[in-house]
Amino acid sequence: MEIKFRTATLEDVDKIVDLCNDCFGDNTNKEAARAIFEKTKNDPNVIHVIGEVEGVIVAHTRIQIVETMFKGMETFAILNHVCVSGHYRRHNIASKMLEIIKKVCKDKNCISIKLWSMNFREAAHACYQKFGFKKEECGFFQLNL
């Protein structure tokens, strides 16, 4: 199976939403997703990477580059919605996508890549750890507004 990775376009958003809704049980509104994508599409620090097999989007992640002025943090990346379609798992697609993400982040002078993942996604955690991610012993705090 050949997978091709590329940067997503506005035309891909509906299929990305379908994939992420399926992978995460989300209920993301496509119109709202298109509006946000449109608003951020020219931001060089927001990158959506997709993987396609025979023209079908089977993998996705969003990279947010965070530039800081602080020593020890410098520039880093945050990944979210890292997903591979259930039908295409166990084919090293996530690892291949992480390699591309790593290159993008190095090209953007990031010193680290961070991601968060829901506790129940144990298979994803194993993939991340196999790739070299280390689970940090810290809390993720959220304030709902």
Image (cartoon, rainbow, N blue to C red):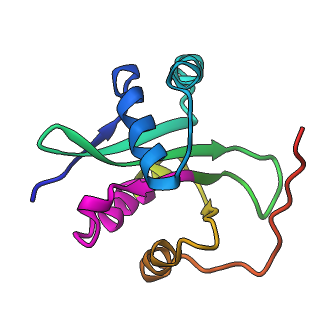
Percent position (x, y) of residue 42? 52, 20
Residue 108 in the image, given as x and y percentages of width and height: 52, 46
Residue 4 placement (x, y as % from top left): 20, 47
Q: Quadrant of residue 88?
A: bottom left
Q: Dividing the picture into quarters, in which one does residue 101 lie?
A: bottom left
Q: Nearer the viewer, residue 29 or 61?
A: 29
Would residue 89 be found to the left or right of residue 63 on screen? left
Residue at the (44%, 59%) spot, across then down: 102
Asked if residue 62 lies left or right of residue 13, the reply is right
Would you say residue 93 sits in the magenta stretch?
A: yes
Above/below status of 18 relative to 71: above
- What residue lies at 60% left-to-right and 43% top-to-bottom? 64
Residue 126, horizontal then vertical, whole percent: 47, 81
Span colored in magenta: 80-102
Q: At 26% from the left edge and 73% from the top edge, which residue is drawn? A: 90
Q: Does residue 90 show up?
A: yes
Is residue 96 one of those drawn in magenta? Answer: yes
* Most foreground residue, 113 or 139: 139
Dividing the image into 4 quarters, which one contains the N terminus? Answer: bottom left
Please state if 139 lies on the left or on the right of 87 as rendered. Answer: right
Q: Nearer the viewer, residue 88 or 74?
A: 88
Q: Quadrant of the C terminus?
A: top right
- The number of discs equals 0
Q: Is residue 112 visible?
A: no
In the image, is residue 98 above or below residue 32?
below
Q: Quadrant of residue 18?
A: top left
Q: Residue at x 77, y 81 (%)?
A: 137
